[in-house]
Image: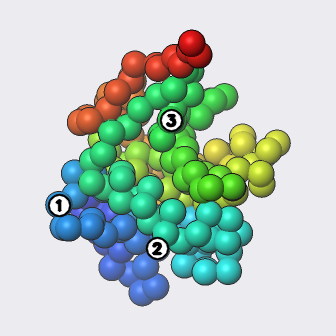
């Protein structure tokens, strides 16, 4: 069974173990799934993440991903999507930036252009807990798809195949 078929099977369970974020306009260039703690956090309108940035900001960032909008870097860190360090390097953060507070979606790639967000936390919560949450996301993946490895690429361009600027931008003041 292919990885796509396995993800679809998890969507079809009752209750679903994965939820595929719908493409606005029906023209998805990339796929985004929420699972584990991230799905619970997203569905709870009283959750810290929904309260911190608002549901609309999360929907806008998720839509940016599925529509295939630009993924970019600023300096050494990603501006929208970034590989987390220290290892495991196959864990990524999707940045959800609100007017005051920030939320991070922590997840892995099932295949190129298919991000599975498994943890969703406010940026403040993650201080001192990054490695714990990265390992937790990998554990969540193993619980969803035992024996299936996450997708591993050599650079961001292996994960995001279109509309990705991996050139680090530097801003200088006049």
Quadrant of the frame with the N terminus:
bottom left
Q: Position of residue 102 (x, y in %)?
A: 65, 53
In this image, 67 relative to 82: left or right?
A: left
- Quadrant of the image occupied by residue 19: bottom left
| Residue for badge 2 | 17
The CA span between labels 2 and 1 is: 24 Å
**Mark toward the viewer: 2 or 1:** 1
- Comparing 57 with 91, the one in front is 57
Identity of the residue drawn at 48% across and 41% down: 80
Mark 1 and mark 3 in contact? Answer it, CB < 8 Å: no
- Residue 3 visible in this rendered orientation of the protein: no
| Residue for badge 3 | 79
Q: Position of residue 169 (x, y in %)?
A: 47, 20
- Quadrant of the image occupied by residue 109: top left
- Residue 166 visible in this rendered orientation of the protein: yes
| Residue for badge 1 | 27
The CA span between labels 1 and 3 is: 24 Å
Closer to the chain start, of discs 1 and 3, is: 1
């Amino acid at each position: 069974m292919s990885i796509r078929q396995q993800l679809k099977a998890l969507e079809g369970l009752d209750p679903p173990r994965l939820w595929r974020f719908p493409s606005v306009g029906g023209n998805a260039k990339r796929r985004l799934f929420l699972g584990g703690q991230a799905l619970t956090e997203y569905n709870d309108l009283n959750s810290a993440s929904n309260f911190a940035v608002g549901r609309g900001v999360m929907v806008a960032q998720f839509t940016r991903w599925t529509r295939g909008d630009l993924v970019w870097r600023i300096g050494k860190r990603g501006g929208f999507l970034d590989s987390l360090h220290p290892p495991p390097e196959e864990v990524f953060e999707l940045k959800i930036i609100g007017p005051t507070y920030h939320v991070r979606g922590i997840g892995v790639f099932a295949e190129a252009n298919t991000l599975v967000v498994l943890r969703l936390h406010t940026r403040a919560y993650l201080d001192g807990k990054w490695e714990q949450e990265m390992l937790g996301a990998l554990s969540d993946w193993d619980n969803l798809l035992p024996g299936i490895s996450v997708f591993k690429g050599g650079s961001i361009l292996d994960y995001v195949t279109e509309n990705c600027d991996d050139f680090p931008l530097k801003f200088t003041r006049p």
